[in-house]
Image (spheres, helix red, strand yellow):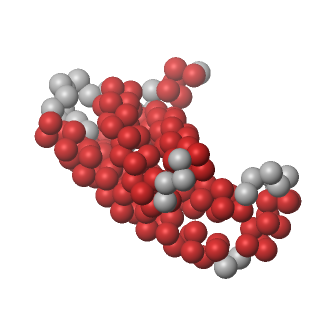
């Protein structure tokens, strides 16, 4: 049963995406809360690092590409992912954190109801914004990876969406 579930490309993409998200969040939180790096700069650093790891995981695990790594494919991946992470995520993080900044009482109320009162409001806002941004960028990334970056030349792209 697990083998059948793992054979689905979207399942592999989501697993790799969860790993990359946790990796990205770890770097982001370390930079912001331990290194005192400004949020948007920290996001650029954490996202760039996780993008490089993501390329290899997507190449080998998600899309099971038999093609050799190439600068051309890495650049396409980096541009697509870069736009998804650096542009889309950064804009979403900016919007969410600025919207939540004026709702600190509501954020504190949500934190209390979720029993995460030890988390600072800033940490909660940052991580909520990042997770929303990840979901938006993930949809963008999967579509473009499937139809452009890791497009299979042996079959039409719509034949293997779930394979």
Counting every numbered tag in the picture gives 0
Where residue 14 sits: x, y (%)? 50, 40
Residue at point 36% right, 57% down? 86
Q: Depth check: 61 or 128 in front?
A: 128
| Residue 108 in sight from this viewpoint | yes
Q: Is residue 4 left or right of residue 128?
A: left
116 up-or-down from 60: above or below: below
Tell me where residue 113 sits by quadrant. Answer: bottom right
87 up-or-down from 36: above or below: below
Tell me where residue 68 sits by quadrant. Answer: top left
Where residue 154 sits: x, y (%)? 18, 32
Residue sitting farthest toward the bottom: 102
Q: Depth check: 154 or 37 in front?
A: 37
Q: Depth check: 117 or 160 in front?
A: 117
Q: Is residue 154 left or right of residue 117?
A: left
| Residue 133 in sight from this viewpoint | no
Residue at point 73% right, 57% down? 120
98 up-or-down from 64: above or below: below
Q: Depth check: 125 or 38 in front?
A: 38
Residue at point 47% right, 39% down? 20
Where residue 27 sits: x, y (%)? 50, 42
- Is the N terminus in the top left, top right, bottom left or bottom right quadrant? top right
Where residue 150 sits: x, y (%)? 25, 39
Residue at point 79% right, 66% down? 108
- Is the C terminus in the top left, top right, bottom left or bottom right quadrant? top left
């Amino acid at each position: 049963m697990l083998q059948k579930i793992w054979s689905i490309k979207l399942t592999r993409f989501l697993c790799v995406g969860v790993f990359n998200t946790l990796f990205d969040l770890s770097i982001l939180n370390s930079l912001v809360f331990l290194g005192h790096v400004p949020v948007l700069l920290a996001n650029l650093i954490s996202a760039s690092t996780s993008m490089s790891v993501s390329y290899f995981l997507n190449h080998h695990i998600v899309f099971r590409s038999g093609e050799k790594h190439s600068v051309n494919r890495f650049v396409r991946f980096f541009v697509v992912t870069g736009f998804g992470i650096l542009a889309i995520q950064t804009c979403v993080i900016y919007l969410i954190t600025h919207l939540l900044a004026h709702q600190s009482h509501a954020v504190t109320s949500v934190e209390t109801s979720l029993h995460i009162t030890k988390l600072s409001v800033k940490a909660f806002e940052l991580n909520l914004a990042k997770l929303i941004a990840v979901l938006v960028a993930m949809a963008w990334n999967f579509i473009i990876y499937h139809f452009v970056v890791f497009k299979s030349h042996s079959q039409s792209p719509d034949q293997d969406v779930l394979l």
